[in-house]
Amino acid sequence: MEKLEQLYEGKAKKVYNTEDPDLLIVSYKDDATAFNGQKKGQIADKGVVNNIMSNIIFQILEDSGVPTHLVRQLSDRETLVKRVRILPLEVIVRNVAAGSFSNRYGVEEGRPFAKPVLEFSYKNDELGDPLINDDHILALELATEEQLALVRQYALKVNEVMKEFFLRRDLRLIDYKIEFGVHQGELILADEISPDTCRLWDVKTNEKMDKDRFRRDLGNVEETYQAVLARVRA
Ligand code: UDP
């Protein structure tokens, strides 16, 4: 499958049309942004890590009954995916307090939750992706009630599968963000799952092995992305 004209360029990926109107090619970049685009940089070969890692995880999720946009990987940076209409929602699942949860509620990072915490942000850069609840989502018509129920169900299934997957690789899944889209009337998992979109802490050392190394200038950013990919491939 060949790339045709570029459809869209986001912060971390470019998206191209193909000859099939139902399929797109995503191309992962090394560009990194944080704090709503205020901090910018590059992480060498991040695009390769995120592409390969995301595809491995999406395949496992497919096999576990969560439909995804994955069709097939084309190269180190490029993947053929189903075209979706993205729901303008960031679906965040948390197992342990960190990041904006810790800041908002004044809870120290690392405090585990008795059960997963599901939270939604309205994907809107101008508004700074504000936190919203189910009623807000329905009032703004960002998703139907049926879609919202399925989003919750899939988000928790993704959590079960990923928690176990990462734990076997000595990584604790602290939290993550996923996105869903609609393809031919079906709700499916889209976007990516990578160290850009998950918090992963080493089980033994508690070392942060994710984008917080970039956000917080912790060093060894490239090396950490490579180390995560090596564990995911193991
Ligand atoms: N996240 C993301 N994209 C966003 C916001 C958050 O991928 O635009 C991920 C983030 O990497 C973390 C989880 O979602 O794994 C929860 O992020 P949080 O709400 O704590 O926000 P942050 O601290 O990253 O601002």
Image (cartoon, helix red, strand yellow):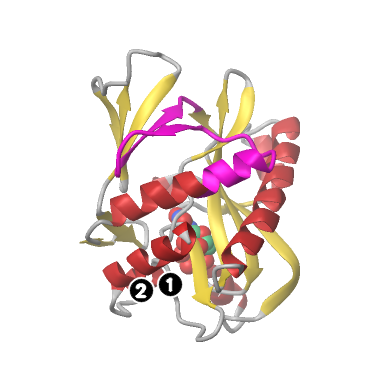
Is the residue 202 above or below the residue 168 in the image? below
Q: Which mark is residue 209?
A: 1
Is the residue 163 above or below the residue 150 in the image? below
Residue position for label 2: 213
Q: Which mark is residue 122?
A: none
Identity of the residue drawn at 72% across and 73% down: 113
SS state under label 1 = loop
Label 2, residues with CA under 10 Å away: few <14, some 14-19, many ≥20 = some
Region of the chain picked out in magenta, as a range: 57-84
SS state under label 2 = helix
| 156 to the left or right of 202 | right
Q: Position of residue 161 (x, y in %)?
A: 66, 54
Closer-to-camera residue (100/223): 223
Identity of the residue drawn at 38% across and 52% down: 50
Q: Quadrant of residue 144?
A: top right
How far apart, in angstroms, are the residues tagged by discs 2 and 1?
7 Å
